[in-house]
Image (tube, grey):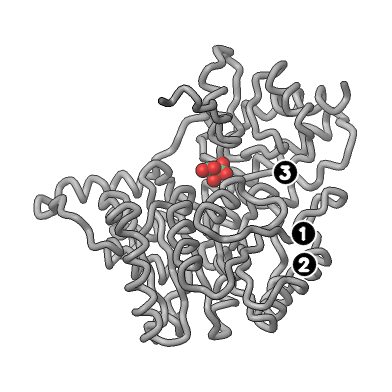
Amino acid sequence: VFSHVVRAPEDPILGVTVAYNKDPSPVKLNLGVGAYRTEEGKPLVLNVVRKAEQMLVNDRSRVKEYLPIVGLAEFNKLSAKLIFGADSPAIRENRVTTVQCLSGTGSLRVGAEFLARHYHQRTIYIPQPTWGNHPKIFTLSGLSVKTYRYYDPATRGLNFQGLLEDLGSAPSGAIVLLHACAHNPTGVDPTLQQWEQIRRLMRSKALLPFFDSAYQGFASGNLDADAQSVRMFVADGGECFVAQSYAKNMGLYGERVGALSVVCKTADVASRVESQLKLVIRPMFSNPPIHGASIVATILKDRNMYNDWTIELKAMADRIISMRQELFDALRARGTPGDWSHIIKQIGMFTFTGLNSEQVAFMTREYHIYMTSDGRISMAGLSSKTVPHLADAIHAAVTR
Ligand code: LMR
C-alpha cells in the first residue's frame, strides 16, 4: 500500500551531515550544520553543563514525573528573564507567558499554531533569505508565508530600503518574523538605529513581531547586547512573540531545550493566551522533556554557574570571530579575487560567502568540504588547522 511513496529529498541543512558522514576522506570538513566545534574539530559540552548534570544526577530527590504541559516553571521564568532582562516591566506586570518547547523549532511551531488559531491575520512575512526550516514550520502551522527583502547580494549587507518598503506595504496586522541577532544564513543584522526604524514602522502598521532568538550571546559574546532588538520592541509596551533556543548558547543541541514567550498587553490576556497554548502543546507532544530544561534552570539560577556560563559562551563567540579574521587573512594571502571583507563584517555562526551552488559542489567534490548549497559556511565548524584547506578550496572555486 505504500509503493506509491516517492523518496523525499534530504533536508538542505541536516542532509549535508548525512553526506559528510558517508565520505571516507581524512581531510573532510563539515561546515554545513550550525554546530560549535572546538579547535580540534570536536563537539563541545560546556563545563558548566557537565557540572549541572552532575548535580542533577546526585540529587536523589529528583524524579521522572511528567512536567506540566507548559514545562518547568522555574525554567520558564528564568528564560523570560534572560531574553527580556531582569528589570523588564512586562515580566513585572505579569504580561508575559512563557512555555517550554522543543528548542527553537518547537517554540516557533507552537507560536505559529496559536497564531493560526487565534490571530486575525494569517500572513507571516519572513526575510529573504532565511533559515530553511522557517517557511516549512509556518506553512504547516496554517499560516500563509510571504517574504520581505533583507539581503543585498551586491553589497553582501542589509537591503534596508527594500526591507522598509516591503514591511511598509504589508497588510496591517501581518506577522513579521525577525531574527533577534546573528541572522541565519547571512550573518547580517540591522544596526540599533535601523532596528528602531523597523520598530517604529511595524508599530505604526500594527505588524506583529515574532522573534527567533537562536543565538543570544553567540553573536557578540554578550547576552544583553544580543537581546537588544527584542527588548526594544518589548519596551514600547506592545505585543511580541519570542522563540528561544538553548541549542547554540548552551550547546544543548540534542536536548531540544527552548521556550516560547508571548508578551501581551495585560496579565489577564497573558493567562488566557497560556491556557490556549496548552491546547496546542498537549496534542503535539503532551509535555516537554525534563532533563535539558533542568540543566538550564540549574545554571541560570546560580550566580556562579551563570558567570561560568557567560565565560564559556564568550570563549565560543571569540573563537568564531577569530576564525573570520583567519579566513579573511588566508584569502588575502592567496590573492583570491573578490572583496572578502563581508567575512569579517558578518556576525554570528555563519558566513554567507557569496559562493554559488556550482562552486559549493566543486568544493565538496574536490576538497571534501561540506556546506549548504546557498554558500553558507558555519564558522563554528572551522579551526586554525582547517582554515588553509578551506581557503585553498575557495580560491580554486573562484579562479577555475
Ligand atoms: C542550522 O541552521 O544549521 C541550525 O540551525 C541547525 C538546524 O537545525 O538547521
Name the residue that disc number 3 marks. Answer: 352
Is residue 296 visible in the rendered image? The answer is: yes
The residue shown at (81%, 60%) is: 159
The residue shown at (58%, 67%) is: 122
User: What x and y, as percent, mark residue 279?
Assistant: 33, 65
Q: Quadrant of residue 335?
A: top right
Judge the density around disc 1: few (<14), some (14-19), many (≥20) Cα neighbours within 10 Å.
many
Q: Secondary structure at mark 3?
A: strand
User: What x and y, as percent, mark residue 322?
Assistant: 65, 43
User: What x and y, as percent, mark residue 178?
Assistant: 62, 63
Is residue 217 visible in the rendered image? The answer is: no
Q: Which mark is residue 166?
A: 2
Whether residues under marks 3 and 2 lie with C-beta atoms below 8 angstroms apart, the answer is no
The residue shown at (15%, 54%) is: 65
Marks 3 and 1: which is nearer the front?
1
* Amino acid at circle 1: Arg
Q: Which mark is residue 149?
A: 1
* Amino acid at circle 3: Phe
Q: Earlier in the sequence, mark 3 or mark 2?
A: 2
Q: Earlier in the sequence, mark 3 or mark 1?
A: 1
Whether residues under marks 2 and 1 lie with C-beta atoms below 8 angstroms apart, the answer is yes
